[in-house]
Image: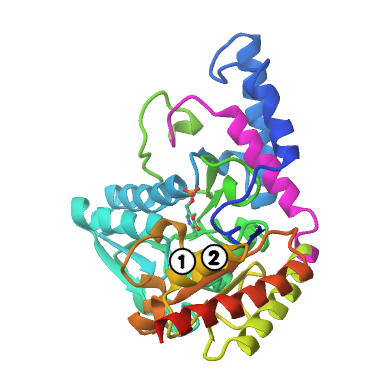
Amino acid sequence: MIFLDAAATTPVRREVLAAMWPHLSGEFGNPSSHHSLGEAAAAALADARAAAARVLGCRPGEVVFTSGGTEADNLAVKGIALARRAADPRLDRVAISAVEHPAVTESARYLERVHGFAVDVIPVDRHGQVTEDAIAAALRPETAVVSVMYANNEVGTVQPVARLAGLAAAAGVPLHTDAVQAAGWLPLDAKALGVAALSVSGHKLGAPKGCGALVVRGRTRLEPLVHGGGQERGRRSGTGNVAAAVALATALTLAAQDQAGRAARVAALRDGFIAAVLEGVPGAVLTGHPAERLPSVASFCFPGTSGESVLLELERRGVVCSSGSACAAGSDEPSPVLVALGIPAAVAQTAVRFSFDAAITAAELDQAAAAVRGAVGSVRSLGA
Ligand code: PLP
C-alpha cells in the first residue's frame, strides 16, 4: 500500500511517542498542582512551550496549547474578533480568504449568525492566491480580524503571507494564518511572517490527533472560548495536557530540522510525479499554483471521471489518497476551494489529491503515477 494522504494525517513518530510516554505514566501530575508531581508536570509543560516557541518564532507566553488545528482556528477567528469588538463596537466585520479550511469559514459564519458580524470573503486568483489588491479591498476600518491560510489543504497553494500580513498590519488589522498544512514544509516563524496569530496541528507532523497550538503575538487581544480554571494564561481553560504539549513540541522540533533540505527533496519528487501524471493521463489538469505550492501536495482534476470512482480504483491498485479535504469526504457538493479557483463544479467533482510525507520515494511515485494512468483509464472506459 502506498499512502499518499499525508495531508489528512500522519502516523505518530517513534521519537514523539517516546517523549510523551513518561507524561502518560510515571510523571502523570496535574501541572496546576502544588506538590512535586504537579511541579514536574508544570516544568515539562513549560519546556514544551519553550521548544514550540523556538520553532514558531514567538515567546513561550505567546503559545496557547489547544486540542488541534480546528480549536486553534476557532480561538483565533472568534477570540480576536470578539475581543476587539468588545473594546471598540465599530469593529464588526471579519475577512477570510475564499479558500480557508472549514475551521475558519465556519467560525466566521458563527460570528455572523450569532454575533452579528459581517463576513467579507477575499477572492483568490485561478491558482488560489490572495492578491495584494484583493486583501487591500477587504481591509476596512471596521475589520476586526483577517484570516488567510499559509498553505491550502486541498490544492497546496502557498500564500504570500508575509506580504499580506504587512498590508494588514499597515491597516491596523491583526492577521491570523492557519499554518496547519505549512508546518514541516515551510518556515513557521510567526515574527518573521509578521502575523498576529498562527495555528498548527500535531497530527499532520507525526504527533497524535488532538493536539495543536495557537500563537497569539504581542498585544493581540483575545477573548477565551473555553472558560474555567484559567489555564494557558486565561486564554484556554482546562487541565494542561502535558503529554500532548510535549508531543507537539517534539514533532515541531523534529520537523524544523533540515526543513529546507527535506522540502527541496520532496518538491523535486512532486514535480516528477506531476509531470508523469500530466503526460500519462490525457486531459488531466493540475489544480493550485504551478510553483508556489507545498512540496508535499499534487492535486488534479480528471475530467470525464468522478473523483470518488478514481479513488476506489486507485485503492484497488494499492494507492491510498483522497479527493481533497478529509473533512469534506463523502460530500456530494463540489469543493468550495476548487469553485473559488474558478473550476466548474462538474470538473471540481473529479478532484484527487496526492499528499506525501518526508519518507516518500521516487520508486513509490513512479508506481503511483502508473496506477493513476490505469485508474483514470478504467473509470473513463466504464463511463463510456
Ligand atoms: N486547517 C487545515 C488547513 C487543515 O488541513 C486541518 C486538518 O485537516 C485543520 C485546520 C484542522 O486541524 P485538526 O484536524 O487538528 O483539527
Q: Which residue is mark 2?
A: 150
Q: Main secondary structure of the magenta part?
A: helix
Q: CA distance from mark 2 to mark 1?
A: 7 Å
- CA neighbours of label 2 inside 10 A, class few (<14), some (14 to 19), many (20+): many
Three-letter residue code for mark 2: Tyr
The spot of residue 156 in percent (x, y) is 56, 70
Q: Does residue 379 show up magenta in the picture?
A: no
Image quadrant assignment for residue 20: top right
* Residue sitting farthest toward the top: 35
The spot of residue 118 in percent (x, y) is 23, 64
Which of 259/173 is in front? 259
Q: Residue at x 57, y 72 (%)?
A: 158
Q: Which residues are magenta?
A: 235-261
Q: Does residue 247 show up magenta in the picture?
A: yes
Q: Residue at x 60, y 35 (%)?
A: 245
Q: Which residue is mark 1?
A: 148
Instruction: Classify mark 2: helix, strand or loop.
Output: loop
Image quadrant assignment for residue 248: top right
Q: Are marks 2 and 1 in contact (CB under 8 Å)?
A: no
Q: Residue at x 71, y 43 (%)?
A: 13
